[in-house]
Image (tube, grey):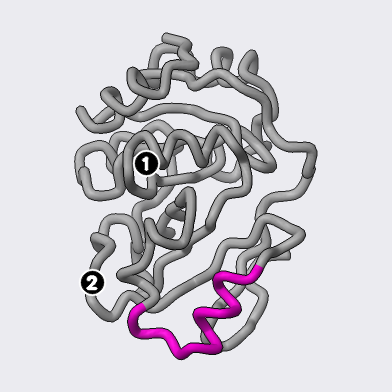
Amino acid sequence: MKSSDFSAVSTVIKSGGVIAYPTETVWGLGCDPWNKAAVYKLLRIKQRPAEKGLIIVAADVLQVAPLLQSLSAAQRRQFCAPVEQATTWLIPDEQQWIPAWVKGAYSTVAVRISQHPIVQQLCRALDQPIISTSANVSGQKTIRTSEEIHSLFGNKLDMILQGKTGETQSPSLIVDLISGKIIRS
């Protein structure tokens, strides 16, 4: 089912559904990170091993505030600073706020504050972050159009949120916030 109704999409996510939606770079798959069954459904659709972990995306810093409590003031400033390229930060989760089924084999959480208006609206409608992983079969090419979503995933998804991806052609930069090491450029 296609939709541009954020209330309907929120209901689908809150009931354990998996959706596709446009992001800054490519189409993404998303679900409620705190719903284990939904996360595993997404992993099956994507054919991605659970130990690889997943990214969460939020509308703003307040939606991930529990993750920032253990950071130094300098690290919080770096995380909150405006970025030119979509950036996913690897952040320690000392309070275990994010479930292990999202982090996979890692102790850190991959977090991006989205600059895409549709992602921001979606997270605000839910009042929480969501899973954000590229809408493709693991290891295959990323998807840039809703037509490709329908072709590849068909009825495996509970809903497709209408919209267009951003103009950026490359995936988000991934940076370890503590070490500064660039994991993916």
Task: Point out residue 129 in the picture as x, y percentages from the top left corner.
Answer: 38, 49
Q: Position of residue 136 (x, y in %)?
A: 56, 34
Q: CA distance from mark 2 to mark 1?
A: 21 Å
* Residue 96: image tag: 2
Residue drawn at x 51%, y 41% as measured from the top left:
120
Pair 2/1: label in front: 2
Few, some or many residues within 10 Å of mark 2 (<14, 14–19, 20+): some
Amino acid under label 2? Gln
Give the secondary structure at mark 2.
loop
Q: Is residue 149 magenta?
A: no
Q: Amino acid at mark 1?
A: Leu
- Please say whether residue 136 is visible from this viewpoint: no
Residue 51 point in image, percent of width and height: 36, 60
Residue at screen point 54% across, 68% down: 89
Q: Looking at this rendering, what residue extends furthest in the top direction? A: 1
Q: Nearer the viewer, residue 125 or 158?
A: 125
Residue visible at 61% across and 22% down in the picture: 163
Nearer to us in this view, 172 or 143: 172
Observer able to see residue 102: yes
Depicted 168 relative to depicted 65: above or below: above
Magenta segment = 69-81
Name the residue tied to disc 1: 43
Left or right of 168, for residue 27: left
Of pointers 2 and 1, the one earlier in the residue sequence: 1
Quadrant in the picture for the N terminus:
top left
Residue 78 lies in magenta, yes or no? yes
Who's the residue at 69% across and 29% down the image? 144
